[in-house]
Amino acid sequence: MKQIILSLIALSVVGLVVVFMYYDRHYETQPREMEEQPIREVEQVVPPVPPTPPRPETNQAPITVVGYLECLPIKPGVTETTLECAVGIAIDRSDGHMALDASLLNSAPLDIPMGSKVTATGMFTPHMELSTLEKYDIDGVLKVTSVTAVE
């Protein structure tokens, strides 16, 4: 056993000697002098910044819509269920829905029954500009200044 270990050590030493001899023959051991090269200016390349897409304009003039008071529908795929009823309007003759913000109304909260046909006037904010109400399938929020029942 002792002979085997000594043989392995001897082979390792011989192997190292062979490697060093090969290296010494094939590679220069003396450093080369650096050739002097002119310094070139490096052009800094900055990737172009993509243009910011224009934000949809908020309709600054009041709009009037006709539809039916409803609890806003939840977006397809949203698993969160609530017992609350976010009041909105289903636009007549379309599949559009708008949340109603009654904060500008001078009177008490709406006392018109759900499902009633109404005319609502106010400032519209598209859904792309909203950070809340993400779970509802709406086109935007109508900040109403007047809501009247239609007979």
Image: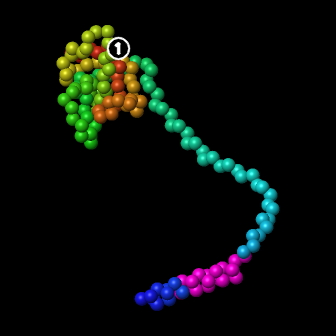
Extreme residue in the front direction: 2
Picture quadrant of residue 135: top left
Q: Which residues are magenta?
A: 11-28
Residue 151: within the magenta? no
95 lies above or below 119: below
At a point 25% along the width and 26% down the height, the residue shown is 86
Q: Quadrant of the C terminus?
A: top left
At a point 28% along the width and 37% down the height, the residue shown is 75
How many badges with numbers are in the image? 1
> Dot 1: few (<14), some (14–19), or many (≥20) neighbours within 10 Å?
few
Extreme residue in the bottom direction: 3
Where in the figure is residue 58, as x and y percent of width and height? Answer: 44, 25
Where in the figure is residue 122, as x and y percent of width and height? Answer: 36, 18
Residue nearer the viewer, 106 or 79: 79
Where in the figure is residue 61, as x and y percent of width and height? Answer: 43, 19
Please give the residue where the numbered disc 1 appears in the rendered image. Answer: 104
Query: In terms of secondary structure, what is the magenta stretch mainly?
Result: helix
119 lies above or below 48: above
Q: Is 17 displayed left or right of 126 in the figure?
A: right
Extreme residue in the top direction: 106
SS state under label 1: loop
At a point 58% along the width and 42% down the height, the residue shown is 49
Q: Is 47 displayed left or right of 56 in the figure?
A: right
At a point 26% along the width and 39% down the height, the residue shown is 78
Q: Quadrant of the N terminus?
A: bottom left
Residue nearer the viewer, 57 or 109: 109
Can residue 96 be seen here? The reply is no
Can residue 127 be seen here? The reply is yes
| Amino acid type at mark 1 | Leu
Residue nearer the viewer, 128 or 23: 23
